[in-house]
Amino acid sequence: MTDLSHLRVDFPILHQQVHGEPLVYFDNAASSQKPRQVIAELTRYYELDNANVHRGLYELSNRATDSFEAARKKVACFIGAGSADEVIFTRGTTESINLVAQVWAAQFLKAGDVILYTGMEHHSNLVPWQLAARRTGAVLKHIPVLDDGTLDLTLLDLLLTEQAKLFACVHVSNSLGTINPVRELCAKARALGVTTLIDGAQAAGHLPVNVRDIGCDFYAFSGHKMCAPTGIGVLYGKAEVLAKMEPWHGGGEMIESVTLEASTYKAAPHRFEAGTPDIAGVIGLGAAIDYLESVGIEKIHQHGQELTAYAMQCLAELPGIRLLGPQGDRASLAAFALACAHPHDLVEFANTHGLALRGGHHCTQPLMKRFKVPGTSRASFYFYNTAAEVDRMMDILHRAVTFFS
Ligand code: C6P
């Protein structure tokens, strides 16, 4: 198995005891831990360069602006965007999707148009479209999920038609671990003139992402799931699509000129970034990308697949377990339901042994309904997790089965 355990030294938080036992952090799909290189960069910025960006004509502001815009270029390279102008900074995936569901939808959706999504979307890629449908009169349709946790693509020709104006799809499911064939789906959508938005919250920083190869119009992700601070995220938008979009929030930084009656606006990305941005967050995201690239995204992906395969194989032996999601190619998480315990009880039991799992509906209530479970327990991994930690999880889960049975 790919061994990246030497990198654990970079994550101070991992080296602690919780309830008298070594911490095992398996809630990386909710938020990843941060390496000291990222923490150091945040400290460096605040200690040496802190100032507002894009406005000062003095040294500190120039330095802050340079680091901020350098991070934008790093993001563009990291996701294979055509230009840094296609990278809009937001607070996270949720805000990125809402930006499109408000601005783009208001301009380009009308009553009767179809918004197509899938049955495995996170609420962040459902609710904004439901709100957009209410505002515009658009109709919502979805691609159902099969028992094995993949999309029922036999219905694709029926659902993805010219009537669909927007196709929103999660790249990697946070509840099933499914990796969707987004490249093929976007190619089909593009051929029909359908605009595409991919929710990359669980993909960016975990597997290689190239937005031009995927061929999507929008790609949304969060920094905090890929070693960056919380509160910073990205909306990638194809240049020609962004060029047609009205501004979102109005305020400083997004304007060209303002009179008391009217204003003119900057081009993307600044048109969509009103007010003082999360400067430290952006610089931290740049440092996180440097860090992930030094490890290697391919290696991170391979490690995740191997560790998950091992965890799935171990979990399958637990009495009364039901594993959700595809068996083969999948992302680095394992979701399961145990006959003997509610996920919340199980996760609380795990916590008393220092094991951080997540239990609940994972913001995918329709998916829980689809699989007829109130919720699941979920172990989600990142490159600093080890097979020895999976063994510890199994030891704790076996004890849980004895305790609850
Ligand atoms: N999922 C989890 O699974 P924000 O909160 O904006 O950073 O990300 C929202 C989001 C959007 N799409 C997907 C596929 C996601 O997995 C998430 C966040 C977390 O634990 C919290 S529910």
Image (spheres, rainbow, N blue to C red):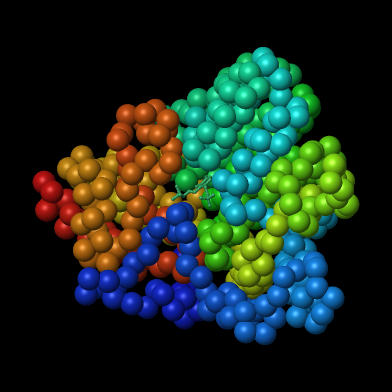
* Rendered residue at 47%/76% (across/down): 11
User: Seen in the image, is 2 located left or right of residue 63?
Assistant: left
- Give the percent coordinates (x, y) of residue 15: 37, 78
Residue 296 seen by the camera: no
- Give the percent coordinates (x, y) of residue 117: 58, 29
> How many numbered callouts?
0
- Quick one: 51 or 129, which is closer to the camera? 51
- Give the percent coordinates (x, y) of residue 368: 37, 34
* Rendered residue at 82%/80% (across/down): 58
**Outermost residue to the bottom:** 48
- Quick one: 319 or 264, which is closer to the camera? 264
Q: From what the image shows, is residue 105 above or below residue 214?
A: above
* Rendered residue at 17%/51% (across/down): 401
Q: From what the image shows, is residue 129 above or below residue 206?
A: above
Quarter assignment of residue 363:
top left
Quarter assignment of residue 183:
top right
* Rendered residue at 60%/59% (across/down): 232
Q: From what the image shows, is residue 229 above or below residue 265?
A: below
- Quick one: 39 or 199, which is closer to the camera? 39
- Quick one: 274 or 124, which is closer to the camera? 274
Residue 44 seen by the camera: yes
User: Seen in the image, is 251 located left or right of residue 391?
Assistant: right
- Give the percent coordinates (x, y) of residue 93: 59, 48
